Image: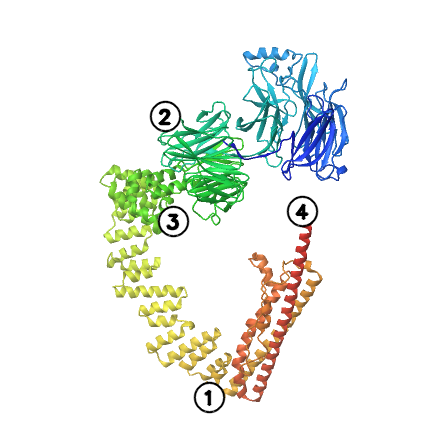
């Protein structure tokens, strides 16, 4: 579906032979002057017309070209220092090498002359065919890069070759049954081939050999003329690169011509075959391009347009285009053929002066260089589709494909016809279009196609009529010729059309010209000079000229647009340019994608295919750089042909050439959004159904508009099934929107047609979150008077929800008729539900009946309310029901106006809480029940204040209070809450001695002294002084333990650091610094009695140790190992750091706080206590100094480890960089 468009034609001085440097793109030519037996060759660089070198060589014999091979050699061999050079083989027999910066040299000669020559693609082998002389036949000579002879042998031989097939007769027509054909086939197979089965030479055969290498250089194809007693004919042979004959062409193929070209991809050998007369059987004057395999068998081909045999065939670098050269007396014609879906299309036809040489650029597949007698022309081509791009609703997406003298047209909006077929064909009366371009008339289903020929532009109008009419009901499309505009030397056309005028842009050599057609007249307009490659582009707003600067200058106005680079393929919509340059896709000057292979633009989207085999989509109005494109997978190698927004279709062409239509979600969503914006809910729902889109889109697009337009939605959709489809598809993160939508639909549907939309109403109830089954059953109950309707609705409701659940809901409405209806339509056994319903109906009174129903349904709260209302005879049952189902809070609500039963409920609630050891709540419940003694018995030591408050309010005796105080004091002492225990005894039992002992155990020496001073000073000597010394001893002992632990762990960390330096590989961790190094402490800066160190805060000196280098969770097993810190394990160092951190953090802070409370109380107690206080202060200060020293040491270790790690990483980076430089460069 793609055509070839010319981007530029560059001309230089003429020459007779061409060669292009694949690396630099520089073109070289040879000019020849023959004088007698000598020919003077001049090698010229064509872009500067500078002569590289010239020399005289032997002239070629009559009928043999003076130059039989010309190539730019990347490596001329050791003789020329492996430098690049020009390699020339002359027909006179000389092999010439011209270094690009040196002197020409004849490196070898063949006295007989050379008829043909060709270098292998890798330039390692030069193949020559030496001319026949006297009794010496044509000889194939293989030479190395240094021009040493590798092999030499006659070309003609009776041997088939080393790869001759072995035929055992299986599969031949003679051995198979073919009905009436079988006998004739057997007889024909038995007959020998005619003596000259290859047939005579074609009339235009020049009798010269032809050579062509396969792309990888392993095989050489040689076409030569052989003569026997019956005449002359052509034979194609396959040789290996060592000169060994591999295969010979099938002798039954007649009429082979002199052309020969091996396709770079596909291993197909192309030649020409003539039919009619003595040549191949077939129509007279038919000429085919015949394809052969390497083994010499015919393998397909196609028929050329004329009756003449071409002078040459030339494949481009990737084998996608075949140039066919026809040589006439005064002119030459070059045809360009491409293939798709097993059909060959004639895309362009160039009429030129007599051509002497043709070659394709080796690196740029679509650059064709032609040397003719007047100039050397370089044609830069581009492959693109010509598809109309009208905006919806007139988007016909009509594709125009050039195929010789026909233009194949397919409007994809109306029908998708697979190529090479088409919806219709437009005859061009034997002419081949140079270029085609589309324009659309705004506001009408009319497209205009501009067809550029060598001397004119034809503008054809396509009026489609009603695009919604399809198939046989549609009238045939009849194109109408609007106008013809003269155009000389133009190779591109673009146009913009309106109702009464057309602006046509023509691109010639370096110039774009505007021609305006209006009222039947042509007016020449603006002309713009362009540089390098160029395009003219048409759009709805006007026509533009685009060149290598990236600018798009408007020809029918003064504005301009800009692309980020020159884009051979570009489109303009709403003054926004989108273009593809290589693989870079630009929207304006912004690059959207670096890997695009094709693109198109719709009214909403920019669509492209990528090398990742995806089609991608972004909104046209979005920020192209920041937007994340949507994508979907497509077949490998797919290319976009057309996008049809109205049909939501994207037409792709596969590499083979067949078409595939897909309906990408972004295109479908764009149409759905448009329909919703226009409140066309019926169409939007239809599209969602067809393309299986989430129905939530109908609401999510504009929730407010949707909720306001539910009545309109119902009117447009009308089908209850389709409404049900929407309702059942509703999904939200929260229930509120779904319930609001369902309620709105229920209300609207009941207003519209309660009977007709009964199923939809039921669906809306069931779809709520949670499902409103009760509402649905109530709707069902409203139709009980119409049995048929009710039964049908019931069956539908059972389809939506579980039948057993619906039965329970109906029963919960206390409606036995409704429950019976649901049960009858469900698969339940009548023997079960009939007896069950009868038993319930027999219960009296009604409150008790409802209690039985709710109890059966498990609605115990409601059941309790009915049981409480059933009368005094069920009062005891009600309390028992409360205890059975633990309905204590429900009971408080039910009996809130019945104090006796309420107190009984509270009492049972207290018992329940007490059994669950929820003593505080149980005591409160007993108080509410009027049972304070039970509340006091329930309180525990945690609530001793509330207990004594209750005891005081109940006026308990002093003895009872003392007993309660001793009880709570014992519990508090057992919980190590000595201060609280002492407070209880002091307040309620007057047991001073026990209270002072408890205060001493709490290390509250000051409070103990206060209590003793008021009544029992003797307790100071017996309890307080010894307790103070015991507290000091405990603190000193704890400090000693901490000091010993710190010393051991710091020493072990130092040993581990030494091991790391000696053997780093022994440590399995990634980093030299362990996790979570943070052993900072919050040692306060206090003076004597309030401050216990004069050193700076340990936190300041150890803050650098907070170097957490690992993150993430560990497996449970590994975590356990890490916490254990086993000596020698990989986790030991981490464990030690964490242990030191806890030591100088939590434990040290605790000791400091205890010392701060104890030291001020030791001093007044006497000399021994003052000595103990001094000892405690010294020991604590010493330990803090040890902590500071340890912090400094560990910080230094961490800094050194970090420095070593940085040095190791830098060395590794340098080593990797050195390896990269070694292997990459």
Is residue 822 in view? Answer: no
**Contact, mark 2 vs mark 3 (Cβ under 8 Å):** no
Foreground disc of the pair 2, 1: 2
Work out how far the residue at label 4 is from the one at label 1, CA to CA, in angstroms.
93 Å
Is residue 292 in view? Answer: yes
Q: Give the mark, 4 or 1, whose residue is nearer the N terminus.
A: 1
Q: Give the mark, 2 or 4, whose residue is nearer the N terminus.
A: 2
Q: Secondary structure at mark 4?
A: helix
Observer-nearest of 853 and 1003: 1003
Foreground disc of the pair 2, 3: 2
Q: Give the mark, 2 or 3, whose residue is nearer the N terminus.
A: 2
Give the residue number, with chain letter if any, for mark 1: 1013
Q: Give the mark, 1 or 3, whose residue is nearer the N terminus.
A: 3
Q: Give the mark, 2 or 1, whose residue is nearer the N terminus.
A: 2
Work out how far the residue at label 4 is from the one at label 3, CA to CA, in angstroms.
55 Å
Give the residue number, with chain letter if any, for mark 2: 475
**Does 551 appear above or below 962?**
above
Foreground disc of the pair 4, 1: 4
Give the residue number, with chain letter if any, for mark 4: 1224
Q: Is residue 827 left or right of residue 553?
A: left
Q: Secondary structure at mark 1?
A: helix
């Amino acid at each position: 579906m793609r055509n070839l468009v010319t981007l530029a034609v560059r001309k230089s001085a003429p020459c007779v032979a061409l060669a292009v440097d694949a690396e630099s793109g520089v073109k070289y030519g040879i000019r020849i002057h023959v004088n007698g037996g000598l020919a003077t060759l001049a090698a010229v660089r064509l872009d500067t017309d500078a002569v590289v070198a010239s020399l005289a060589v032997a002239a070629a014999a009559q009928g043999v070209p003076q130059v039989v091979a010309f190539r730019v050699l990347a490596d001329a061999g050791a003789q020329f220092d492996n430098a690049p050079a020009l390699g020339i083989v002359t027909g006179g027999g000389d092999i010439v090498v011209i270094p690009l910066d040196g002197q020409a040299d004849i490196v070898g000669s063949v006295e007989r002359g050379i008829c043909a020559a060709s270098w292998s693609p890798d330039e390692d082998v030069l193949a020559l065919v030496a001319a026949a002389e006297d009794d010496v036949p044509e000889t194939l000579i293989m030479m190395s890069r240094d021009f040493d002879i590798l092999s030499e042998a006659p070309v003609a031989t009776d041997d088939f070759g080393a790869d001759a097939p072995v035929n055992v007769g299986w599969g031949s027509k003679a051995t198979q049954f073919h009905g009436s054909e079988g006998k004739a086939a057997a007889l024909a197979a038995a007959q020998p081939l005619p003596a000259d089965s290859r047939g005579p030479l074609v009339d235009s055969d020049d009798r010269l050999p032809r050579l062509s290498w396969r792309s990888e250089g392993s095989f050489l194809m040689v076409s030569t003329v052989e003569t026997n007693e019956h005449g002359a004919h052509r034979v194609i042979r396959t040789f290996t690169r060592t000169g060994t004959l591999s295969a010979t062409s099938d002798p039954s193929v007649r009429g082979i011509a002199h052309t020969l070209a091996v396709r770079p991809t596909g291993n197909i050998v192309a030649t020409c075959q003539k039919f009619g007369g003595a040549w191949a059987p077939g129509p007279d004057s038919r000429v085919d391009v015949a394809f052969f395999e390497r083994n010499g068998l015919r393998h397909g081909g196609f028929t050329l347009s004329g009756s003449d045999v071409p002078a040459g065939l030339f494949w481009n670098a990737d084998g996608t285009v075949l140039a066919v050269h026809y040589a006439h007396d005064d002119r030459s014609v070059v045809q360009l053929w491409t293939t798709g879906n097993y059909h060959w299309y004639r895309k362009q036809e160039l009429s030129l002066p007599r051509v002497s040489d043709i070659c394709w650029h080796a690196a740029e597949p679509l650059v064709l260089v032609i040397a003719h007698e007047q100039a050397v022309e370089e044609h830069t081509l581009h492959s693109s589709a010509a598809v109309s791009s009208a905006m919806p609703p007139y988007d016909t997406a009509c594709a125009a494909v050039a195929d010789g003298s026909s233009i194949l047209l397919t409007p994809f909006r109306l029908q998708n016809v697979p190529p090479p077929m088409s919806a219709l064909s437009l005859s061009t009366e034997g002419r081949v279009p140079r270029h085609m371009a589309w324009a659309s008339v705004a506001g009408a289903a009319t497209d205009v196609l501009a067809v550029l020929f060598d001397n004119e532009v034809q503008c054809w109008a396509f009026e489609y009529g009603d695009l919604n009419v399809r198939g046989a009901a549609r009238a045939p499309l009849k194109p109408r010729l609007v106008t013809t505009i003269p155009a000389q030397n133009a190779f591109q056309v673009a146009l913009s059309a309106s109702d009464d005028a057309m602006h046509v842009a023509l691109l010639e050599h370096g110039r774009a010209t505007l021609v305006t057609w209006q009222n039947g007249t042509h007016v020449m307009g603006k002309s713009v000079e362009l540089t390098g490659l160029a395009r003219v582009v048409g759009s709805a707003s006007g026509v533009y000229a685009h060149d290598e600067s990236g600018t798009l200058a408007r020809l029918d106005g003064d504005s301009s647009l800009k692309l980020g680079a020159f884009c051979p393929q570009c489109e303009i919509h709403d003054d926004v340019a989108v273009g593809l340059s290589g693989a870079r896709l630009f929207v304006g000057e912004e690059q959207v994608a670096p890997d695009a292979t094709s693109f198109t633009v719709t009214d909403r989207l920019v669509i492209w295919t990528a090398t990742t085999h995806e089609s991608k989509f972004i909104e046209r109005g979005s920020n192209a750089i920041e937007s994340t494109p949507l994508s979907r997978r497509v077949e490998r190698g797919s290319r976009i042909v057309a996008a049809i927004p109205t049909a939501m279709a994207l037409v792709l062409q596969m590499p083979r050439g067949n078409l595939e239509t897909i309906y990408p979600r972004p295109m479908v969503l764009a149409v759905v959004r448009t329909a919703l914006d226009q409140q066309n809910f019926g169409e939007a729902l239809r599209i969602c159904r067809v393309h299986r889109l989430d129905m939530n889109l109908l609401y999510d697009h504009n929730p407010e508009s949707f909720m306001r337009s539910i009545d309109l939605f119902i009117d447009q959709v009308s089908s209850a099934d389709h409404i049900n489809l929407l309702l059942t598809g509703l999904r939200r993160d929260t229930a509120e929107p779904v319930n609001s939508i369902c309620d709105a639909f229920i209300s609207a549907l009941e207003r519209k047609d309660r009977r007709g939309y009964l199923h939809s109403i039921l669906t809306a109830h069931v779809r709520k979150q949670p499902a409103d089954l009760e509402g649905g059953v109530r709707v069902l109950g409203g139709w009980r008077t119409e049995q048929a309707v009710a039964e049908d609705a019931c069956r539908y409701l059972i389809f939506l929800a579980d039948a057993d659940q619906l039965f329970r809901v109906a029963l919960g409405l206390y409606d036995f008729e409704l429950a019976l209806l649901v049960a009858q339509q469900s698969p339940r056994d009548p023997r079960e539900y009939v007896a069950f319903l009868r038993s319930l109906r027999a219960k009296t009174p009604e409150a008790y009946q409802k209690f039985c129903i709710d109890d059966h349904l498990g609605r115990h709260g409601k059941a309790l309310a009915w049981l409480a209302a059933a009368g005094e005879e069920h009062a005891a049952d009600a309390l028992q029901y409360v205890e059975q189902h633990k309905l204590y809070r429900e009971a408080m609500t039910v009996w809130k106006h019945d104090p006796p039963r309420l107190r009984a409920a509270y009492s049972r609630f207290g018992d329940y809480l007490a059994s669950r050891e929820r003593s505080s709540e149980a005591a409160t419940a007993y108080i509410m029940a009027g049972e304070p003694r039970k509340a006091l018995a329930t309180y525990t030591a945690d609530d001793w204040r509330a207990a004594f408050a209750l005891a005081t309010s109940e006026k308990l005796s002093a003895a009872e209070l003392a007993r309660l105080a001793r009880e709570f004091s014992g519990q508090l002492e057992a919980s190590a809450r000595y201060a609280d225990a002492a407070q209880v005894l002091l307040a309620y039992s007057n047991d001073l001695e026990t209270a002072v002992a408890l205060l001493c155990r709490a290390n509250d020496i000051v409070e103990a002294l206060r209590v003793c001073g008021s009544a029992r000073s003797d307790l100071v000597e017996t309890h307080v002084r010894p307790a103070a010394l015991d507290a000091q001893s405990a603190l000193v002992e704890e400090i000693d333990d901490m000091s010993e632990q710190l010393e051991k762990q710091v020493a072990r960390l130092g040993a581990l650091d030494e091991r790391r330096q000696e053997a780093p590989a022994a440590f399995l961790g990634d980093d030299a610094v362990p996790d979570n190094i943070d052993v900072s402490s919050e040692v306060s800066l206090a003076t004597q009695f309030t401050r216990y160190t004069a050193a700076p805060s340990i936190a300041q000196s150890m803050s650098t140790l907070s170097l957490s280098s690992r993150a993430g969770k560990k497996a449970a097993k590994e975590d356990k190992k890490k916490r254990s810190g086993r000596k020698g394990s990989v986790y030991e160092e981490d464990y030690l750091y964490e242990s030191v951190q806890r030591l100088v953090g939590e434990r040290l802070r605790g000791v400091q706080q205890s010392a701060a409370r104890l030291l001020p109380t030791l001093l007044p107690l006497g000399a021994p206590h003052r000595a103990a206080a001094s000892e405690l202060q010294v020991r604590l200060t010493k330990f803090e100094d040890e902590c500071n020293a340890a912090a400094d040491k560990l910080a230094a270790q961490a800094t050194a480890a970090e420095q070593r790690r940085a040095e190791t990483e830098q060395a590794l980076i340098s080593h990797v960089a050195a390896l990269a430089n070694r292997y990459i460069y």
